Amino acid sequence: MIPEIGHFALILALCLAIAQAVFPLAGSLNNTPSWVALARPLAWGQALFLGIAIGALTYSFLVNDFSVSYVAYNSNTRLPIVYKISAVWGAHEGSLLLWAFFLGAWGAAIAIFSRHLAREVVGRVLAVMGMINIGFLLFMLITSNPFERMFPIPAEGRDLNPLLQDPGLALHPPTLYLGYVGFSVAFGFAIAALIGGRLDASWARWSRPWTTVAWVWLTLGITIGSWWAYYELGWGGWWFWDPVENASFMPWLAGTALMHSLAVTEKRGAFRSWTVMLALLAFSLSLLGTFLVRSGVLTSVHAFAADPARGLFILIFLLVVVGGSLALYAWRAPTIFGGGRFDLISRESFLLGNNLLLTVLTFLILFGTLAPLIYDAMNWGKISVGFPWFNRMFLMVTPFLAILLGFGPLMHWKRTDGAALMRKLRIAAIVSIVIGLIGFWPAISNGSLLVPLGLFLAAWLVTSLVVSIRDRLKHKRGLGGFLSDFGSSGGRSYYGMVLGHLGVAMFILGATMVSNHGIEKDVRMAPGESAEISGYRFVFDGVTRTPGPNFIANRGKFRVFRGDDEITILEPEKRTYLVQQMPMTEAAIDWGLTRDLYVSLGEDLGGGDWSMRLYYKPFVRWIWLGGLFMAFGGILAVTDPRYRSLKRKKKQEAPAGAAAPASLATENN
Amino acid sequence: MKPRHKRLIFVAVAVVALGVAATLIITGLRSNVSYFFSPTEVLAGKHPKDAVFRIGGLVKEGSLKRIGKSLTVQFIVTDNAADVTTQYTGILPDLFQEGQGVVAKGRIGEDGIFQAEEVLAKHDEKYMPPEAQAALDEAAEAKKNKQQENLQ
């Protein structure tokens, strides 16, 4: 009964999505306010029914309803309750449901937080989101219904993929999806603006917080995913340039460019067409990511057993969305060209540089990710593009990005006095060059030019930020001055930017250190033997068998010494999950701010000997700390009071604003 | 500077950036791409002799063994028509099993043994790397055609 309610709720949500796609948009075009007014209740209804659907599926998991085939394939009576809940989005059908639910939830969020927006705009944005959800709900109902029953009913479920039985998985997909789906809001705003021909500063101001929130979620999702892969896969790596990782990184890059471009459009009215393009791009890349994950067209560690019908459906959907939005863009964008003028040395042109670099990087990664498909389609052979290629491309672009990033915050809009800028940054440049030179020291560089480069860039980011803060607080004194600046309108945006850019510096430092100083050693050890890496001695005390709730573990014990001091005991496990009889490596990590020690068990070689992998990972935590800093920076920026004062202002203007015809906006151009 | 000049500079910068990027992509790709060959193709000598490439298929049942007291393992990758003996030193991924699909990257040594640098892992035991599947399908197809020819 409950699964049928869920199924029925999905169908109702689809009906509402169709209504939401049609009426508000049509109403906004033929001046029928009553149709436009349907947008908010429809968005509410959609979120409600999708909530019921996901609730029904969660319930089916909790009561072990194995007549639902999705539950039977992904759960088991012995699966711990937490993982029964996270199993809801652990496989194809459920993750789609989560996607659709989040889309509904974002729609409802717009309905709540858009009181200050013109009604037609809200109507159009929600209409676009309705169209997207039609695609996803149809996809789900036609090819991947999570509520499908099976007969005969199995007595026991097949259990959740053991890799996914981990707190990291409980968090990673939802955060990532919130980000992916969140870009649909920016997309909706962009499409609405294209339809209305209204691409002015206020449009940018509306979409900015939404874009930033989506970006924050995506940043968190990628960070958690990287961290999860690091400790759960047992390979000690934090990024593999896997097609699916790239699929999350590309919208992130486009989204980062979009955030910065929106700032220019809001403040200066420039780059309008470009900003719209980025909004279309960010969401299209999110969809492409979903396509890559769900269709199984690429060899990827994330790929699931594939069904060609699904791939085809998403591909068609992708083509409709991308093609449709590009066509609309081609038709409407030229009318909204223009904007403020600016000099070569100005914040605008540096942000444009940042945008160009981010976009180039996005397309490089896109090319590398899709190259195997292109080669295959052209009959040039079956290829895979190696890790080193992506690394090289990444390193080719990002140093320039980091250098620009140091200048950006100190630049003025419109024009900046180059000589004054140089004077301000002189000390920062000297300090960071000196730090970079110190990086050439053999003990630090470890023979790689990347270490001095990385240290220089990280130092440049930090020192230039310090200069920027000092410049900003020039006329304020002490902590009180800082606090009053922090609380002022635009203050949190600024300090959010500082945090975000600091995060980039931390990421650079972490990635540089772990890539060039990390040590990895595969060894064979008998109980009592020891191995040493980077001054740490690992003494192997053998392996014992320990039962877990739904697995049996071989638990190894290592005592780790530095000199004569025992600093920690590490107990990595090799688990065999009972239902799927699937082996799993559970690494043991002693973490610290300056280094991780990491042990994972290989296999039993007989006679008490085991193969195992030992890692020394300096500064690896800084990579994820950097991600967290970026996310916090985003949150700080969104909570800036200036967005709230904007709402208040809008409310006062509301009677006049609502009546203002679209032609007012076109006058701006 | 006139706005038109400025736009011109921006466009020039963008064009140069794109040109540089394109050059880098192509030169970089050449040395970092690895092609896929099925065991049948490897046996027919179609694989590159001095470059890294990938093979894939099934790990032949009963072929997995360990060499001495080292971390080196040996197994046979098969597409049910041809076998390629493969060696790998290191720790195999969790889901590596006899009878399961596998993709490995490496090169063929003088002795005709494929020395794998990397054995691809997968996340899901149901998952079959598409290339390995294609290799098996092609070999099966070839076998069927041959049988039909023999019958005729």
Image (tube, coloured by chain):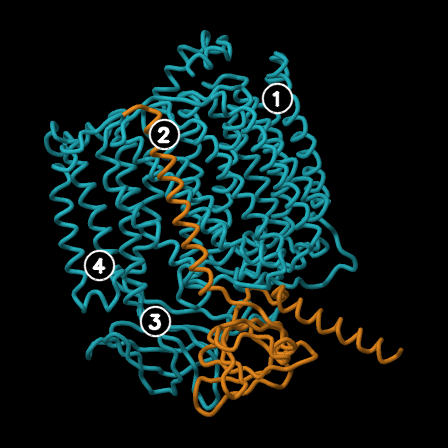
Q: Secondary structure at mark 4?
A: helix
Q: Secondary structure at mark 3?
A: strand
Alpha-carbon distance for marks 2 and 4? 36 Å
Q: Chain of mark 4?
A: A
Please state which amino acid type lies under the numbered disc 1. Answer: Leu
Comparing A403 with A118, the one in front is: A403
Alpha-carbon distance for marks 3 and 2? 51 Å
Q: Which residue is mark 2?
A: B7
Q: Chain of mark 2?
A: B
Q: Which residue is mark 1?
A: A25
Q: Which residue is mark 3?
A: A615
Determine the colour of chain B. orange
Comparing A595 with B134, the one in front is: B134
Q: Secondary structure at mark 1?
A: helix
Q: Chain of mark 1?
A: A
Q: Which residue is mark 4?
A: A452
Q: Chain of mark 3?
A: A
